[in-house]
Amino acid sequence: MHKVIFDTDPGIDDAMALLFLHQHPEIDLIGITTVFGNASVETTTRNALFLKREWNITAPVARGDGKAFDPMRNPVDWPVMIHGHDGLGNIDVPQTIDLPVDPRPAHRFIIDTVRENPGEVTLIAVGRMSNLAFALKEDPQIAALVKQVIIMGGAFDVPGNITPAAEANIHGDPEAADVVMTAPWNVTVVGLDVTMKTVMTRTLLDEIVRKGGARAKLLSDISQLYIDFYGRHVKDGMVVHDSCACIYLVAPELFTTRSGAIRVVAGGIADGQTIQKPDGRAFPPGNWDELPSQHACIGIDTDAVLALLAETLSRPA
Ligand code: BDR
Ligand code: CA
């Protein structure tokens, strides 16, 4: 069983990834931590509670503090045209959900849970990397106690999606992402190089709803706005960014990775760009030296990934 803390900004593709984690038989979802990104942290937390209630998820929800790692960065803009005013596709999510939030801030929840389960917890982070960076700042020793970190974010050999240089999750808190990439733990980065190739068509989503029933129907309702938005980039379907990171956990053989130290640019026109120094390539001494070798996904078996995703989302409650 893979013990997972899911750090997320629901968010439409986040919602799909959450249902995947909840329904996969080899995954034990032990915590959900929220971060700003697709909406404010108040909204993403409310959405996490909403999905927890609708899908009968038992994992506790702990709220991020809504701040970027560098206090000079002030998160203000939310991508309402992609994820909706409510962050979940304008389905009129209730204003408040009558479920408790864990009393600890997200980064403290991560520290405590990792320390209670040394060597066992996988962190899957599919929003800004703020909570992970704050956890490392408060307790750097947890790096050695985490089993692995899987991130949705970044763009290595392809353009970004928020600027030509940067992907949104990294661009929203580059200082945090650099802390996470350079810490002495095992990081796999599932970025736009592979996620932009992974498109769930409306037809496949409809099939999932037919087999999966009410849970899948809610997912489909949430996803329509996002599919309409992505129509300008891909043909009639949704790019399943965050699910790709979750699938890497259970089926890493469906991905090709490249190893090497990863840094994140902070400031300037390439703010938020992810750059890897591939292992084995020699350069003069520089900013990538003496850092842990991390793993950037550069290839994906999209058909197999989509089949596994569809099969898992189709499991009836
Ligand atoms: C990432 O940004 C968010 O909008 C999505 O949920 C995903 O995590 C894609 O760049
Ligand atoms: Ca996300």
Image (cartoon, rainbow, N blue to C red):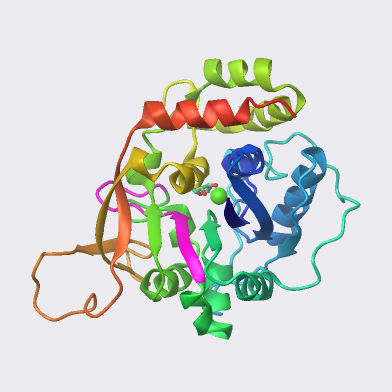
**Residue 202 horizontal/vertical position (percent):** 55, 19
Residue sitting at 43 percent across and 75 percent down? Answer: 179
Whether residue 222 is visible? yes
- The answer to whether residue 217 is above or below residue 182 is above
In the shown orientation, is residue 169 left or right of residue 31? left
Image quadrant assignment for residue 221: top right
Whether residue 228 is visible? no
**Residue 257 horizontal/vertical position (percent):** 28, 50
Residue sitting at 72 percent across and 65 percent down? Answer: 63
The magenta span reads 146-161
- Toward the viewer: 243 or 265? 243
**Residue 297 horizontal/vertical position (percent):** 32, 49
- The answer to whether residue 201 is above or below residue 37 is above
Q: Residue furthest front?
A: 1
- Toward the viewer: 98 or 165? 98
In the shown orientation, is residue 262 left or right of residue 109? left
Image quadrant assignment for residue 195: top left
What is the total number of numbered labels drawn onto the structure image? Answer: 0
Q: Residue furthest right?
A: 98
Residue sitting at 66 percent across and 60 percent down? Answer: 34
**Is residue 299 found inside the magenta-colored segment of the image?**
no
**Residue 313 horizontal/vertical position (percent):** 61, 30
In the shown orientation, is residue 286 left or right of residue 233? left
- Toward the viewer: 252 or 241? 252
Residue sitting at 58 percent across and 44 percent down? Answer: 26
Which image quadrant: the C terminus? Answer: top right
- Toward the viewer: 84 or 301? 301
